[in-house]
Amino acid sequence: MKIIVTGGTGFLGHHLIRALVKAGHQVKNIDLKPSPIYPTVVADVRDQARMLKEIIDADVVFHLASLIEAGESVKKPARYLDFNINGTLSVLEAMRQNGLKTFIFSSSAAIYGEPQNIPIKEDDRTLPISPYGATKLAMEALLNTYVKAHGFSGIALRYFNLYGPEEHHQPETHAIPRFIKQIHQGELVTIWGDGGHLRDYVYIDDIVAAHLEALSLAQKQPTQYHYFNLSTEKPASVMELVNLIETALGQSAKIKHFPDRPGDPRVLYASAEKARQALHWQAQVSLEAGIKRTVDYFINYWQKNATP
């Protein structure tokens, strides 16, 4: 198949393109930054005229391009609404005008806000507590309108804490790569509260596998809108996560506890029953195995890139 990936230079996009190419698909990457490995059309998805030229002659669009930091979105809400909502609208409109009909995109657990029920199910209340979460919910709603009005096939994948090798953000705000670096370098590990907060951590290979299953579902059940939680259903506390990293590194963490953050749920994980039934997907990589692979990657990466 001919597939377009927006945001394919990022962490998930890099892994997804690798899997799509391995599966024999032709892939076109559109991103603000060029990929060091895959040819990239350097363009802004908000540029409607450019998207009309680039989003053409393809079977499927995987829309990964968006801003992703919930904390930053609170400080810069207008920026998040512009990039995420206007960028999505620009891509959908280019697809509509050029006759592309299948749209699969990265949604987020942030759409739920403070959960009413644990584990969270897809049709539970959605009331985001950050502009980032609000944009993801708006992106889902926008996609649904294109499914209903224009006969699109749409799939939203709501994932929780994605992690794995090759995750590099500047600055790094995601917990796992940040903890690995801090422990390895003997820096203080900042933990909000007592470290007992439970979260769901999903390994990158499992998330990529879900995207491939979503591609299959869109072909089998076209002109429908589907939305799925991607969860291991096995939450771990922040302290358990730190302990696994300590074991993998063979080093002890220097931990500094801070007061609980307002609006930070004590327990946050989801049911993946719907994904099991409709996508035939279930997380395969345990947190222990995933952390070991991720730590090994970063140690090798730092050794290769160490300044002489």
Image (spheres, rainbow, N blue to C red):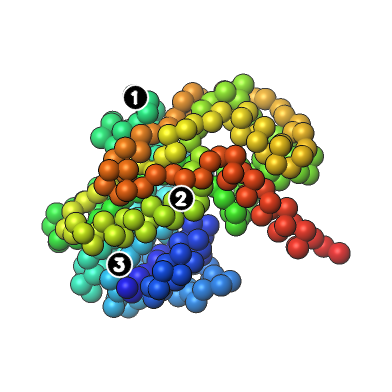
The residue depicted at 45 percent of the width and 75 percent of the height is 41
Distance from disc 1 to disc 3, alpha carbons, whole Å, reads 34 Å
Q: Looking at the image, is mark 1 or mark 2 earlier in the sequence?
A: 1
The residue depicted at 14 percent of the width and 54 percent of the height is 148
The residue depicted at 56 percent of the width and 39 percent of the height is 287
Given the image, on which type of amino acid does mark 1 rest? Asn
The crowding category of the residue bearing disc 1, from other C-alpha atoms within 10 Å (few below 14, some 14 to 19, many at least 20), is few
Q: Name the residue under label 3.
A: 60
Distance from disc 3 to disc 2, alpha carbons, whole Å, reads 20 Å
Given the image, on which type of amino acid does mark 2 rest? Asp
Q: Do the residues labelled 3 and 2 touch (CB within 8 Å)?
A: no
SS under mark 1: loop
93 shown above or below 190: below
Q: In which quarter of the image is residue 297?
A: bottom right
Q: Mark 2 points at which residue?
A: 206
Given the image, on which type of amino acid does mark 3 rest? Val
Q: Mark 1 points at which residue?
A: 117
Q: Indicate the position of residue 174 as horizontal and vertical percent values.
A: 57, 44
SS under mark 2: helix
The residue depicted at 44 percent of the width and 55 percent of the height is 208
Pick the residue in front: 7 or 224.
224
The N terminus lies in quadrant = bottom left
Q: Looking at the image, is mark 3 or mark 2 earlier in the sequence?
A: 3
SS under mark 3: strand
Q: Indicate the position of residue 242 as horizontal and vertical percent values.
A: 65, 34
262 shown above or below 45: above
Distance from disc 1 to disc 2, alpha carbons, whole Å, reads 24 Å
Q: In which quarter of the image is residue 7?
A: bottom left
Residue 29 visible in this rendered orientation of the protein: no
